Amino acid sequence: MATKQRLPAVGATSPACCPSGLAEPIDRVTATELARLLKAVADPARLQLLSLLRSQESSEACVCDLTQPLGLSQPTVSHHLKVLVDAGILRREKRGYWTWYSIVPRRLNELASVLT
C-alpha cells in the first residue's frame, strides 16, 4: 500500500510554486500545490475579490464592504474568501465583530512567476 504524499504547508519553503515558471519540468508535489493555487483564483468572484482588495490603499477590506460590489450574498462571499484564505492568498484578521481580509503578496507573486 502506497503512502499518500502530504502537501507542503501553506507558506512552507519551496516548492514556492515553480521558481522557474513552467520552463522546466516540475514534480508532482509542486504541480499539486500549483494546481491548488490556480483553482483558488479560477473563479470570477474570487478574481473580483482580489481586484477589490488590491485596489484598496491598504490592500485590505472588511467583509462587510465586499458583498455589495460583487452583488452576492454574505455567505457566498464568505465562502469565496475562505477558499482564498485556505490557499494562502489572503490573510484573515478578526477585529471586534468584523473580519478583515488582506492579500498575501508572496502568494500572488508565486502565481505571477508561473504565468510569466
Image: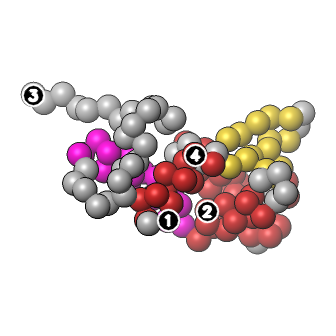
Q: Position of residue 106 (x, y in %)?
A: 57, 46
The amino acid sitting under disc 1 is Ala
Q: Distance between the Cα atoms at labels 4 and 3?
A: 37 Å
Dot 4 and dot 3 residues touching (CB under 8 Å): no
Q: Which residue is mark 1?
A: 42
- Left-right relation of 62 to 116: right
Q: Secondary structure at mark 4?
A: helix
Q: Which residue is mark 2?
A: 46
The amino acid sitting under disc 4 is Arg
**Where, quadrant-wise, is the C terminus in this rendering?**
bottom left
Q: Which residue is mark 4?
A: 106
Q: Secondary structure at mark 2?
A: helix
Q: Distance between the Cα atoms at labels 1 and 4?
A: 18 Å
Q: Secondary structure at mark 3?
A: loop
Dot 2 and dot 4 residues touching (CB under 8 Å): no
Name the foreground residue: 50 vs 12: 12
Dot 2 and dot 1 residues touching (CB under 8 Å): yes
Q: How many C-alpha atoms fall within 10 Å of the one at disc 1: few (<14), some, or many (≥20)?
A: few
Range covered by the magenta-colored residues:
27-43
Instruction: Please say whether residue 14 is one of the residues in the magenta stretch.
Output: no
Instruction: Please say whether residue 29 is one of the residues in the magenta stretch.
Output: yes
Q: Position of residue 98 (x, y in %)?
A: 85, 41
Question: Would residue 83 be seen by someone viewing this image from the given angle?
Answer: no
